Image (cartoon, rainbow, N blue to C red):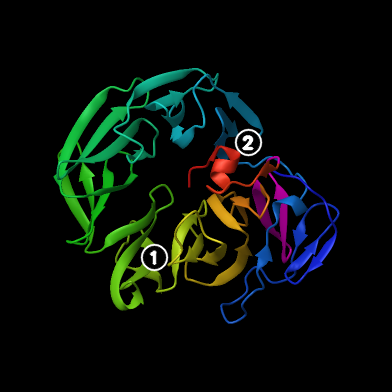
Amino acid sequence: MKRRLSVTLVAVGVVTSAGASLVPGNAQAPTSARPDPIRIQPGDLLPGTDAGVLYSTGNTIHVGDRDIRTDLAGPLDVVDRAAHGYVVATRSPDRLWTVHRDGSATLLGRLPGSWADIEVSTDGTRVAVSWFRRGHTHVGIDRTTDGQRIHHARFAGDVDLDGYGKRRVLLSTWSPDRTFWYTPASQHRTVIARQKAFNVDVAHDRISFGVRDPNGVDGLCVRLARLTTPDQTTWRTCEQKPLAWSGRGGRVLTTDLRSDGLGPRTVQMRNVDGTLLRIFSSGTFGDLRFAGKNAAMFSVQGARQAALVKCALEGGFAHCTLATGLRPASNLGPNHALGLSMPG
């Protein structure tokens, strides 16, 4: 999703002939020393190594340096890894599949529409799908091996499916503000907070909550915590919202709490205590995730071109390279331009 070379000196750094943006600074900069933004222009970068993360383009799943081509109608939406492959959704028609490592696919079932929430259990053996119908939220749980339905639950009102542990799902609601675990085997509910979940990474023990606050954006602020200790706040902010967590949960990618529409124009890398490390800017960001403690992947587009870009912090510099070829920018955003999906 990218490629052009130029040697340009800009206010935020230098684009070198190696196709990398090198921006001096301390990767552990305190919040009092605000780093200059790193401007990502896909066309100014050259190819680097493989992305090193799970993503898809068209009807192909990419895992490290391996490409798994399927016969499914793309573009695919990659949900997560399964016990024996990868759970993906197709849009036309709306179906859920497990794609195996040889490219074959097992149909798990129909999706109730493109608005369905989908979460794979942390052990990859179950997939949960939620949908809203006639005043109730339904949650179905199927096996990822053959799609057999093993549980169905119904909840009054609009309930969000936020995550899936090994044997229980995480759900949340507004009014009343609640976040709770639901255990299918016992149908037991365990409330963990009197606030609604905002962004969750069950595998890495991280969660954020929406906090009602008259000083916040539209009366809302955000607090971050560990999922296992949800009452212990690591950072509270009325300006930023989390988008993705690092593999060990110590860092987070955030953007302006007011960001909406096609995608944010600015993304920040922070420690989970709020310490600001880096600021990345571009025309529009799409899917993004960490590719290690000091590296992040961005689906991004400038005025004319889009690509998947990898930015790594190395020795006080941000080193940005292309993880895909360049594609023309789209008025529907970089994911559409690239036919890309990347689970957070």
Q: Is residue 36 left or right of residue 125?
A: right
Q: Residues within 10 Å of mark 1 (few under 14, many from 20)?
A: many
Q: Which mark is residue 77?
A: none
Sequence-wise, the earlier of marks 1 and 2 is 2
Q: Residue at point 62% right, 28% down?
A: 67
Q: Is residue 50 left or right of residue 146?
A: right
Q: Is residue 212 visible?
A: yes
Residue type marked 1: Leu
Secondary structure, mark 2, is: loop
Q: Quick one: 121 or 154, which is closer to the camera? A: 154
- In terms of secondary structure, what is the magenta stretch mainly? strand
Give x and y (percent) for residue 138: 20, 39
Query: Mark 2 sits on what residue?
Result: 64
**Residue 10 in which image quadrant:** bottom right
Query: Mark 1 sits on what residue?
Result: 224
Q: Residues within 10 Å of mark 2 (few under 14, many from 20)?
A: few
Which residues fall within the magenta stretch? 306-325
Residue at the front extreme? Answer: 331
Residue type marked 2: Gly
The Cα atoms of the two marked residues, 1 and 2, are separated by: 30 Å
Residue 308 part of the magenta-drawn span: yes
Q: Quick one: 32 or 259, which is closer to the camera? A: 259
